[in-house]
Image (cartoon, rainbow, N blue to C red):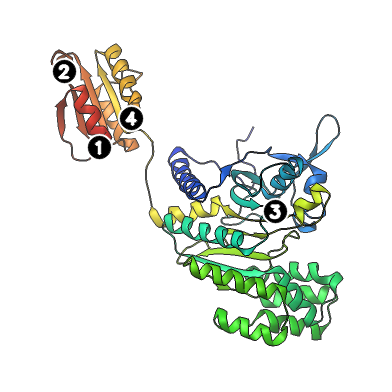
């Protein structure tokens, strides 16, 4: 049997998982700073939930891992965390509103594999359900900006509005029944370029004049203010434009820099208002590392009633991880802070290890009796900062010997002094 990973997946070695956990902890800290609480849902859902009219749409269903259980029920691995959230709220209609949650978990898409694009990847989602106004959209975007800056990145936050895009496309000549298919093509602009978009629109039987109008519209240039001014010349009375202006006003108060991108569409069918994508300045990861928006109809579909306001954003943890590693070049191979080497004093060493753990010091101990020299090599190979020698001579003095692996300095100290030192350093 050949041992290999499934295509589009990867293992994370301990030193890699340490970095990933550090990113997750930072994101959790920011989410909770804004009053969001954790939620967990199954990794798979009933397929009819994933295929719901207001879920991901036909494009994403092509990439859904589908299977049947032993009872012949159709199931699918979740392709995002938004549909499970909508299902959860739909099943819990009496939940207190606004419902603010974050969720971190694995999602699965059977799509093409490329750099920073995997078939199993971790999403970190943060959503608020039950608020109609742009205040919720603004909070989500402000939270996103704070999270990336806390991770040491300079985010480029691009924003559009699906209502506005629909209005602009209709004005350009796109028939209502072709709106979604046109938007799916426009969504490929960033990745495949203008010519591919034109070709796809033509293949979808949209006439040349309309295609020309579409291209002209989505190519509006200038500052955010100039773009708004140009759009107002095209459609003076626009609900989508009003939402954009209100959102931009709130983000100015929150001191969040954003970029108005008229071509931004987000291909998923469930978006109804604000759409957001986040890129990183000066990063080898060129794809969006975070995306989301407003989806007011999806939860209503599960509830069996009309509009049910919701807005959220999803952090692509694997892409953020790749960008973070490139930027920081960290080489931490273990979480251990101190490594204990017993020298004919194993039982006493076990006691001291537990005492240190009681003080929240991360401790590992030699369980195999390798001897001082090999233990020092072992600790050095993992980058453990301190090695603690516990032998009969030290114990007679009620002391232990601590070696700083970076400087090479050795110090004799009491148990109390040891705890104080490790907690401070």
Tell me what residue is drawn at x 38 percent, y 36 percent: 334
| Mark 3: secondary structure | loop
- Image quadrant of residue 154? bottom left
- Residue 263 shows in this picture: no
Q: Which residue is mark 1?
A: 424
- Residue 252 shows in this picture: yes
Is 241 or 327 nearer to us in this picture? Answer: 241
Residue 394 badge: 2
The relative height of residue 171 versus residue 75 in the rendered view (above or below) is below
**Viewed as shown, does residue 83 lie left or right of 208?**
left
Query: In the image, residue 58 lies at what x, y percent?
Result: 80, 57
Dot 3, how many residues are within 10 Å of its Cα: few (below 14), some (14-19), or many (20+)? Answer: some
Query: In the image, residue 213 lies at what x, y percent?
Result: 75, 84
Q: Which residue is mark 3?
A: 111
Query: In the image, residue 77 lies at what x, y percent?
Result: 72, 42
- In the picture, the quarter occupied by the C terminus is top left
The relative height of residue 19 versus residue 142 in the rendered view (above or below) is above
- In the picture, the quarter occupied by the N terminus is top right
Query: In the image, residue 390 lies at what x, y percent?
Result: 22, 19
């Amino acid at each position: 049997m050949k041992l290999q990973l499934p295509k589009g997946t990867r293992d994370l070695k301990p030193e890699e998982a340490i970095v990933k956990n550090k990113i997750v902890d930072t994101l959790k800290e920011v989410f909770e700073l804004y009053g969001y609480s954790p939620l967990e849902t199954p990794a798979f859902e009933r397929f009819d939930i994933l295929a719901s009219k207001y879920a991901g749409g036909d494009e994403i269903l092509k990439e859904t891992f589908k299977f049947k259980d032993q009872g012949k029920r159709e199931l699918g691995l979740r392709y995002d965390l938004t549909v499970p959230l909508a299902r959860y709220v739909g099943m819990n209609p009496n939940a207190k509103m606004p419902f603010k949650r974050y969720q971190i978990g694995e999602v699965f898409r059977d799509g093409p594999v490329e750099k920073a694009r995997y078939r199993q990847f971790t999403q970190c989602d943060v959503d608020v359900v039950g608020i109609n106004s742009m205040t919720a959209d603004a909070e989500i975007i402000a939270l996103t900006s704070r999270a990336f800056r806390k991770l040491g990145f300079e985010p480029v936050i691009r924003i559009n509005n699906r209502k506005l895009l629909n209005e602009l496309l209709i004005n350009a000549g796109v028939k209502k029944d072709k709106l979604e298919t046109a938007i799916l093509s426009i969504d490929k602009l960033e990745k495949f370029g203008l010519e591919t978009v034109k070709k796809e629109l033509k293949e979808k039987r949209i006439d040349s004049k309309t295609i020309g109008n579409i291209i002209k519209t989505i190519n509006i240039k200038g500052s955010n203010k100039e773009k708004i001014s140009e759009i107002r010349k095209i459609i003076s009375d626009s609900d989508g434009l009003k939402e954009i202006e209100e959102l931009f006003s709130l983000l100015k108060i929150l001191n969040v820099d954003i970029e108005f991108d008229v071509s931004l569409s987000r291909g998923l069918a469930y978006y109804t208002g604000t759409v957001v994508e986040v890129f990183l300045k000066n990063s080898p990861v060129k794809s969006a590392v975070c995306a989301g928006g407003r989806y007011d109809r999806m939860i209503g579909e599960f509830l069996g009633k009309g509009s049910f306001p919701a807005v959220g954003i999803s952090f692509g943890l694997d892409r953020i991880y790749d960008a973070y590693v490139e930027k920081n070049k960290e080489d931490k191979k273990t979480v251990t802070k101190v490594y204990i080497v017993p020298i004919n004093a194993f039982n006493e060493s076990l006691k001291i290890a537990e005492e240190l753990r009681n003080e929240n010091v991360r401790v590992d101990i030699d369980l195999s009796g390798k001897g001082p020299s090999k233990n020092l090599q072992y600790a050095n190979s993992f980058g453990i900062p301190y090695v603690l020698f516990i032998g009969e001579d030290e114990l007679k003095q009620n002391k232990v010997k601590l070696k700083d692996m970076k400087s090479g300095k050795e110090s004799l100290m009491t148990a109390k002094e040891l705890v104080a030192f490790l907690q401070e350093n």
